[in-house]
Image (cartoon, coloured by chain):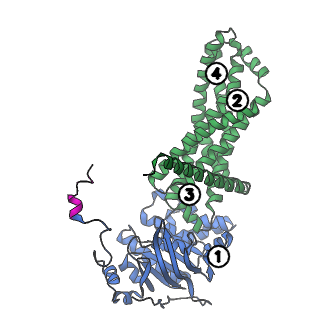
Chain colours: A green, B blue
Amino acid sequence: MRGLPGELIASLGGFLERLGAMTRFSGQVLWQSPAALLRPRLVVEQVYKSGALSLVIIMTCGLFVGMVLGLQGHDLLQRFGSEEALGTGAALSLLKELGPVVTALLFAGRAGTALASELGLMRATDQLSAMEVMAVDPMRRVVVPRFLGGVISMPLLTAVFIAVALFGVQLVGVQILGVDQGQFWSQMRGAVELGDVNEGLIKGVVFGVACSLIAVFEGYNAQPTAEGVGRATTRTVVISAVVTLVLDYILTALML
Amino acid sequence: MSHSHPTADGAGTPVAADPNLAVLTGVDYSIGGKAIFRGLDIVIRRGAVTAIMGPSGTGKTTLLRLITGQLRSDAGSVVVDSRDVARLDRRELYALRRKIGMLFQNGALLTDLDVFENVAFPLREHARLPERLVRNLVLTKLHAVGLRGAARLMPQQLSGGMGRRVALARAIVMDPEILLYDEPFAGLDPISMGVVMRLIRSLNDALGISSVVVTHDVREISQIADASYILSDGRVVASGTPTELREHPSPVVHQFMEGLADGPVSFHYPAPDYRRQLLDRSEVA
């Protein structure tokens, strides 16, 4: 029996050890990334798996987030008699916050878990060991292309999410609740600046790097058992969600 | 207990400066505080089929991982192709591994590639060959294991025996000098077992390579091995030809070769007294 202080120290030690391993792993992945771009076919394959295969869920969720935003935004703005500002408000909130954050959370749930479980199963079924024996570095051949695929996909998915969500806002706000179409679009165009778009894009890239790194790290270092792969998948979603929200606060504070 | 090294050579042994392909001397290896090997000495001769046998949990797979440099020994040396594996840097180790083919117990085929691409994998990673040549090489190796017709199947569509034969085709596609087999007969039906057994011998002789077969299937491996080692308790307890091992005086070797349930190697994992544990109520929640 170690008692509470002992447990806390052990837990902190474990956390620091894992953080160190993650930092080292991230360094290796980033170091090998430029060379992996020389084999674009591997990266494109992963962009398809992480990006294209996530499109349906991203677009569906984007549409409904936009529609809810349309309803809530209209209700709020109506109280001040400024329903026409719906386009501006929705566009800014989607570009700066909702778009990148919700896309990152969905990405972690859809593509992140797929990456982690795939790598974990490759570890459990000796596929990674087989590569090592064949003198093929699994880091270079398997991990880095998957990481890059995620990093490239995330900003693209964010853009798709925002575009579909804006369509959802417009669908509810203009087509159903009767906000003036001209006012809706012109106010949006007048208020949204390039900096706002860039903010969303930067967040998309940063969240893409974070979520992809967490997924490949957890999968690559999973215990080679059914339970270990399951735990790696769960950790991927939980850690990605927390890190995304923490990074979102930091980035927002820096870019405001 | 005999510690003499086997001397049998297989047919078609290539003329080489060093007749020993791999030499393990005084190897100690422990994992999580548990000693797997204590002063292990093994010599793998060129051109021969060498069997490594022993009860489950004696570290047979660990031995293969020491030879491929995936694990480093705590003490002693592992010399493969006249080079100390522990002293090689990453690039040299990868260069050495190109001479090694390994058949994993479960095949370890890449599940996102079909049979053809699995066999082509090492070629595509290491050599820039024209597609036509890759195709011919892959089909030749698949034909050698009798699975040319399964080239476009996915690994999930293969039976255990077929998967292992595909893995074998992949292991030989780069024309290795040494082939390592990890439990090649485990879980196979008698027909597949016979096929794999004959393949090990015929590939060894036809390609002029050396083979190390880790197994506990005594009867099968005795038919094709030139030399055998029996491991127990982290050491080599006997070595020699299958005939020599059958006549070995050691009770451990006798128990293993005859497949007896109990003997020096206990059937039971260490446990408290059976009767006392059944009567003990303190363990019941």
The residue beneath circle 4 is: A169
Q: Position of residue A190 (x, y in %)?
A: 79, 20
Q: Amino acid at mark 3?
A: Leu
Q: Position of residue A205 (x, y in %)?
A: 70, 41
Task: Tell which subunit mark 3 falls on.
Answer: B
Amino acid under disc 4: Val
Question: Would you name the residue on which mark 3 appears?
Answer: B113
Residue B155 vs B75, above or below: the answer is above
Chain at numbered mark 4: A
Label 3: few (<14), some (14–19) or many (≥20) C-alpha neighbours in 10 Å: some
**Are the residues tagged 3 and 1 within 8 Å (C-beta)?**
no
Q: Disc 1 and disc 4: Cα gap in Å? A: 64 Å
* Alpha-carbon span between mark 3 and mark 4: 43 Å
Nearer the camera: disc 2 or disc 4: 2
Which residue carries the number 2 mark? A96
Q: Which residue does the numbered mark 1 point to in the structure image?
A: B87
Q: In this image, A142 relative to B221: left or right?
A: right
The chain letter for the residue carrying disc 1 is B
Asked which quadrant contains residue A63, the reply is top right
Q: Which residues are magenta?
A: B275-285
* Residue depth check, mark 3 versus mark 1: number of the one nearer the observer: 1
Q: Are marks 1 and 4 on the same chain?
A: no
Mark toward the start of the polypeptide (2 vs 4): 2
Disc nearest the viewer among 1 and 4: 1
Select label 2 or label 1 by which is in front: 1
> Are there few (<14), some (14-19), or many (20+) residues within 10 Å of tag 2?
many
